[in-house]
Image (cartoon, rainbow, N blue to C red):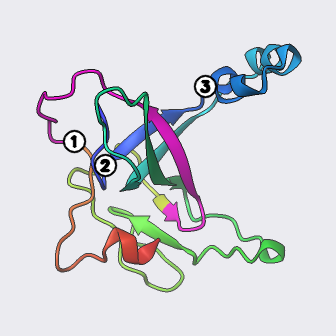
Amino acid sequence: MLPHFGEYVVLKLDLVASLKSLNDPEVSKACRKLQSKTYVACVINLFSFPLPGAEYVSVTATLVSKGLPSSDPGRSITSDISVPIFPSTRHPLSRPPMKPSNPLPWSDCYHPTQATIKCRIQNDTNIGDPWPEPKYKLDVAADSPSPCSVF
């Protein structure tokens, strides 16, 4: 299924497919030896519609970090450039937390606002089927900051 705006997703990079267009057997061989990590992110923008025949859909997502992000002043990154994800409420600037519709299964999670990614997701071939409500998503309520205004 394709993600909704505000839905939390699990991502795993397909290293070989990502660099396939280079047509370089050495790069492909090296990629097969690497182990891909798994990431959790929140979809903040859909760049294309899941139209029949479109192989991929482009999205922007903000990654989730465990704990406040590390500061790196040389790159103008500070731990306060983040948003806590409820039930985490600790923040250097007392920024209010984002509140998923269901609590994430981990504690001490944050959205480092500089950690956004644009990625392609393989299009769902079951176009026309209704999308089920996602288990984890941001509820945009009057007492919560808009995900777009934070990122």
| Three-letter code for the amino acid on which mark 3 is drawn | Asp
For the residue pair 129 and 52, the one nearer the viewer reads as 52
Q: Quadrant of residue 5?
A: bottom left
| Three-letter code for the amino acid on which mark 2 is drawn | Glu
Question: For mark 1, what is the residue?
Answer: 134
Q: Position of residue 141 (x, y in %)?
A: 17, 72
For the residue pair 78 and 25, the one nearer the viewer reads as 25
Other residues around mark 2 within 10 Å, as few (<14) / some (14–19) / many (≥20): many
For the residue pair 136 and 31, the one nearer the viewer reads as 31
| Three-letter code for the amino acid on which mark 1 is drawn | Pro
Alpha carbon distance from label 1 to label 3: 24 Å
Q: How many marks?
A: 3
Q: Which residue lies at the image location 21% right of the left edge and 62% below the top edge?
A: 139
Query: Do tag 2 and tag 1 residues touch (Cβ < 8 Å)?
Result: yes
Q: Is residue 121 magenta?
A: yes
Q: Which residue lies at the image location 38% right of the left edge and 71% below the top edge?
A: 148
Q: Which mark is residue 93?
A: none
Question: For mark 2, what is the residue?
Answer: 7
Q: Is residue 104 above or below residue 141?
A: above
First along the sequence among labels 2 and 1: 2
Q: Which residue lies at the image location 44% right of the left edge and 36% below the top edge?
A: 10
Alpha carbon distance from label 2 to label 3: 21 Å
Which quarter of the image is occupied by the N terminus? top left
